[in-house]
Amino acid sequence: MTIRSTFITVTAAALVGLVMGGVFGFAAGKLTPDFFRHVIPWQDVEPVGFATFGGATVGVLLGGGLGCFGVLLQFILEWRKKP
């Protein structure tokens, strides 16, 4: 894998994680807004916005980590295949 394809793979995985985490956070904030009122230490933030932001942030971290793991796995498989 070239550095460009590695960068594109990890970036795409992080962006997909951003979208999925944001959608999950938005749905969680809409379904259970009272839960996020207890989690937020300040009261002037909307629970749906906080849940969406938190879900998107964690989605980027987990998606990027999954992309890095995929690149590492691809590297190991290509390295073992060469004689």
Image: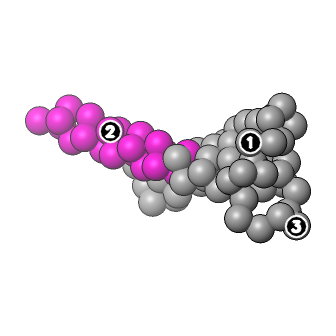
Query: Is residue 8 visible to the viewer in this orientation of the structure?
Result: no
How far apart are the two marked residues, 2 and 1, measured between alpha carbons?
Answer: 38 Å
**Residue with the mark numbered 2:** 73
Q: Relative to 19, does residue 81 appear above or below in the rendering?
A: above
- Identify the amino acid type marked 3: Asp
Which residue lies at the image location 32% right of the left edge and 39% below the top edge?
Answer: 73
Crowding at dot 3, Cα within 10 Å, few <14 / some 14-19 / many 20+, comes out as few
Three-letter amino acid code of the residue under disc 1: Phe
Question: In x, y percent, where is residue 32?
Answer: 80, 35
Please report the bounds of the magenta region as a residue range: 63-83
Q: Is residue 27 left or right of residue 15?
A: right
Q: Check disc 2: other Cα within 10 Å, few if <14, some if 14-19, many if 20+.
A: few
Vertical placement of 30 versus 67: above or below?
above
Q: Which residue is mark 1?
A: 35
* Residue that carries the numbered disc 3 in the rendered image: 44
On the image, which quarter does residue 49 sit in? bottom right
